[in-house]
Image (cartoon, rainbow, N blue to C red):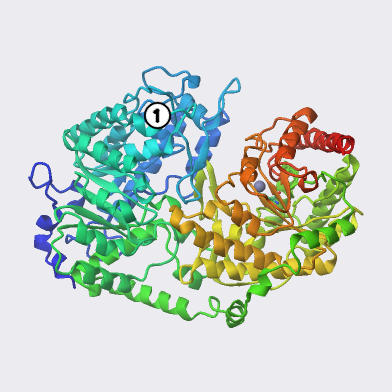
Amino acid sequence: MLLLFGKAGKADRLQAPRNPASGSATALPASTRTMPPNLLGYDMSSELLPVATLGVPRIGRRRELKFALESYWAGKSSADDLLNTAKALRAASWREQAERGVTRIPSNDFSLYDHVLDTAVMVGALPAAYGWTDGPVSLDTYFAMARGGEGGLTALEMTKWFDTNYHYMVPELVHGQNFTLASTKPIDEFLEAKALGIHTRPVLLGPVTFLKLAKARDGDFEPMTLLKTLMPVYVELLGRLKEAGADWVQIDEPTLVLDLTAEEREAFRSAYGALAVADTPEILVATYFGPLGDNLDTAVSLPVGGLHVDCVRAPEQLEQVVTKAPSNWVLSLGVIDGRNIWRTDLAALRERLENTLRGTSFVGIELAPSSSLLHVPIDLDLETALDPELKSWLAFAVQKMSELWILASALSRGEKSVWTDWQATADALQTRAISTRVHDASVAARTAAVDTAMEKRVSPFAERSALQHDRLKLPFFPTTTIGSFPQTAEVRKARAAHARGEMNDADYAAFLRARTAETIRWQEEIGLDVLVHGEFERNDMVQYFGERLSGFAFTKHAWVQSYGSRYVRPPIIFGDVSRPAPMTVGWWRYAQSCTDKPMKGMLTGPVTILNWSFVRDDLPRADVCRQIALAIRDEVLDLEKAGAAMIQIDEAALREGLPLRKSDWQTYLDWAVESFRLTSSGVRDETQIHTHMCYSEFNDIIESIAAMDADVISIETSRSRMELLDAFREFDYPNEIGPGVYDIHSPRVPTVVEMVDLLEHARKRLADRQIWVNPDCGLKTRKWDEVRPALVNMVAAAARLRAEAVVAA
Ligand code: GLN
Ligand code: ZN
């Protein structure tokens, strides 16, 4: 037992950090004194180490928020209905946390759409286009910023939240931007919890991170230069939170784990310096998603009351902060993975914590997940269809809260105080460690036998390309699409009916074949050169493959927010991955039988499957990726054997997987490229390998893209007007490339002239023989009415270019 936290009577003093500014002891939050009900069947009456969550999922166990939002947007329910649902969700989650023994309960972690958008609204940073001048910001204005509004009003840009699959709305700031406290959401929600008898620690997005995530409207200044103007809003807000009774606030500054410039580090000092001289609650600065690294000194020198660090992504930080942080600080140790769904090895963790903390003089230790629990599903107990063994290896948000409480209890009172759970955890870890469902000797043998020859095509591109051209006899500027065609209501209805057992397998297959055949016929009719089957049999490009590979599990209710009201259920990779049987060959064969034109085999690549799943934590990600690569390689070879002359391996999420720190990029890119090559390189020279990527920011990774050595790559470029091709100014991309000419994110039908124009741009950077003509991405979210004219125009654009090229030649 760790005596530092030992005796219950001392806990009051131990847990009350000293206010570094005033030197006076801070009162304990009320929530540590009101003891939660006996949820776990234990005596929860004595004081333990505080337990924090940093933030919890907002969406509701049954996706209540999504349904309330959609109903409101559709005009089927009122603003009050929506706000009442939101309020009920907040109350339920505060109560749940209290019942699970969480003592640092957050407020203002809730959001109707996105917390970065909330922050922009809070500080009054609304672009002029939304028509707000002062006063409260209406719901409709808020949603216009999130999703666009009437009269063609566009939404703010959206982008990935650090290295998660959550997306935030990018605040847009102007030169001389004014800030003002335009929303009292943090105060309102603090008071709302208080009225329920729950004392919370409000969560704010920090000023430096807010500015770091924002963009300048015209790109003509650094948003960080607005810091001095922004700070008075934070000062005012924090003052009002204190008045309302908040003794602590959590200010999220995940920017501290990024590569920072000297000016950005200075921004931290100046921002928190401004708060230190103001009348505010105590401040806990929260960092997560990685190590502070070279920003550690900056972090520990801030004039604040405490710091949260991610000890899962960066275990070494535990010792580092304990050594470097002021001993009167609250240290929130993120020891349980907030980004993944595995049950924690509590015994190992307890030992580690005891060893690190023994003999230190820290008085304000808190236990927490590594990051907010926003990124994990809510409650494992809803997964009644998962088998009990697999379930025993997992922990979702509420289970993680309990893990933290059990850990706190074991640290303060010994593991005997939580014996049942302590034993259950140990048993689960033991079965997982030796399970043959997890460890497949043949997969291990196969991955061990991978040699670099397997990652290389037989001949260099120039030689393969000649053989491929002989075989395929395609015109210059060949036209194709990325794979999927519209997933109409009819397709989704049939899938749902089949899933519910209302449509039998034979009828469903016949239905899908009919859709596929008619789509192929239409592609022939309009004169596309290389066809696709349309992907009607696929629900999702990762799920389809995961469901056919061993080592994957799927959930029914384990939703996580991707953005706004869009949630995803990532597959769980729990074991060694292999492919029991071909996954797409039957469909490819059928599709090719409908046409004499080349039909692309269509697969999702290993890196994308990995990046869009919850990945096992007992193997390095690179090793898991290699296993997936071998499984997809089998599929590639079977497609080739069946006669496919072209096989596309989509790597939509390759760039997304880039680490937050530039110094870690190359390692990732090396194994990601290696996995792609392992997947794709087993084929003969005359088989053409395609890949597709849904983005265009290639400048900084162009060498790795080239190293993938795909014969043809299709990418997104239409929105940026071929800006991407800048990458090719200095770098001579050797293989063929289809820069997207049709923005599939918009319902707009591009004209022939527009597409010709984009292609002319491309011709300035690329040789004619390199250029393919295709849309930016798959067409599954579009309507047939949009897709038909757009592709007809695209084929016409290619024809016009061919004519010009002939004239020019
Ligand atoms: N082949 C997939 C499709 O066309 C690719 C989707 C993607 O890249 N996101 O839908
Ligand atoms: Zn795409």
- Depth check, front residue: 217 or 83: 217
> 253 and 73: which one is in front?
253
Q: Is residue 613 visible?
A: no
Res 378 quadrant in image:
bottom left
Residue 800 found in image quarter: top right
- Does residue 313 appear left or right of residue 490 in this picture? left
Q: Residue at x 18, y 32 (%)?
A: 243
On-image quarter of the C terminus:
top right
* Mark 1: few/some/many CA within 10 Å (<14, 14-19, 20+): many
Question: Which residue was labeled with disc 1?
Answer: 121
Q: How many marks?
A: 1
Coordinates of residue 667 in the picture (x, y in percent): 50, 62
Instruction: Tell me the residue at 57%/66% (across/down).
Output: 625
Where residue 108 appears, x then y in whole percent? 34, 39
Left or right: 537 with respect to 564? Answer: right
Indicate the quadrant where residue 236 lies.
top left
